[in-house]
Amino acid sequence: MTGHNSAAAESLAARLLADLPGLAATVTGHLAERLPVYRRLPAEELDGDVHRIVKQIIGGFARGLRTGRPPEPAQLAAIRASAAKRAEEGLPIDAVLSAYHLGAQACVDALLPETDPGEMAVVHRSLLDYLCVAVSEVAAGYLAERQALVGEDNTQNQTMLAALLSGADPEVSARRTGIRLPTAYFVVSAAIDPHPDELDPGVDAAVAGRRKTRRVRAELDRRCAHPALARVSADEGLLLVPCPDEPDPWAWLRALVEALGKAAGAPVLACATHCAPADVPAAARLAAELREVATAFHRPPGLHRLDDLLLEHQLTRPGPARRQLAALLTPLLDKPDLLPTLRLYLATNLNRRQTAGRLQVHPNTIDYRIRRIAELTSLNPTRHDDLFKLTAALAAHAAEGSP
């Protein structure tokens, strides 16, 4: 420690130590008053372990002020252990660091009366030295514990996710992992587009993808009151999101998907269904099927439910009818302009001008292509019966994965 003046320091340290119990009580009170997260701690924790470490830290500072030496290893270990405990309790690190600054301010306030500027300069220099060492220990202890907790939580979450997807008894799995089951889950299958950095040849695409994945996971944790079970990669995700206690849970989920897209910095298309924990396997299969359908039909990013894809989902189920429907479009496959035109013409509700604008061609070109589609398939999109059959054929064609 620097700037040590033995005579002044001895006197100042004695004053702090003489009032150590009262000063520790004052600081503990300040924590509860000024930092809401400390106020939410149980009273026995605040008056017990927290008060005890506050007393140790003030005492350690006073002894360092008197001797001019840095904190002893035992005191540094106590600081690190206390920070680890705060991390385990879930207190944010900014609040933990603020607690040390409140304690420092209390020491200054206690010594300020009857202390001349020269002596206060000694206090400030010693206090800064002490805080520099203490804050480093706080950060090290806190982060080490958080990393351990995150690793443990992730292992338990992945174990629980795998158990639910396999159809294992949810209650038994919950007891083994220590995870509290919600009444119901949203089961979400998501497709995540590349972030611009992933497409930049000057950027490592794998690194950019990992950054995107971390942002998505962090946003998911931030938005969910209860932990979600998630398997997320750079291009897709399977999420089991506990249904929230909201007036409109589906509106909440829609907002969550939008937030995940913003966090990813890329469009996110998500398909979801709702189920009890025991029904997760079937719900996960349905969500994946819906995502395949939504992708095949070029649905926009955002949330899609079974209600939004009823016709497309039903028409794309395997079987001889699907193959026969898809075959209706075979005459168009060697004409590269016709199938995209038909798809867009139906998507714009038969609006030839809007279709032409999207394809950047003249509306008369659209009229010509529609006539060619009718000639080749014997199905005219402007006739109601043929329109329904063409819509079904497009769905079947997409599901069959035709070129």
Image (spheres, helix red, strand yellow):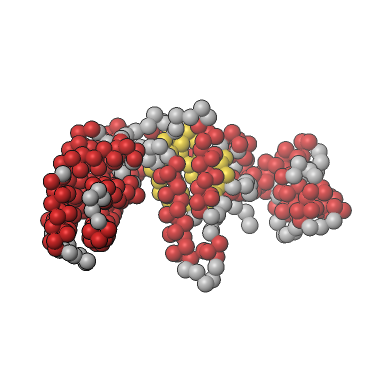
Q: Quadrant of residue 117?
A: bottom left
Q: Looking at the figure, which quarter contains the N terminus?
A: bottom left
> Which of the pair 252/271 is nearer the observer?
252
Please provide percent x and percent y for residue 325.
66, 44
Left of 136 or right of it: where is 363?
Answer: right
> Which of the pair 75/290 is nearer the observer?
75
Q: Residue at x 79, y 58 (%)?
A: 360
Q: Residue at x 14, y 63 (%)?
A: 6
Q: Residue at x 42, y 54 (%)?
A: 214
Q: How many marks?
A: 0
Q: Looking at the figure, which quarter contains the C terminus?
A: bottom right
Please provide percent x and percent y for residue 152.
27, 48
Residue 315 in sight here? no
Q: Quadrant of residue 229?
A: top left
Please provide percent x and percent y for residue 137.
23, 57
> Which of the pair 259/339 is nearer the observer?
259
Residue 394 in sight here? yes
Left of 197 or right of it: where is 58?
Answer: left
Q: Residue at x 17, y 38 (%)?
A: 48
Is residue 252 placed above or below 109 in the rendered structure? Answer: above
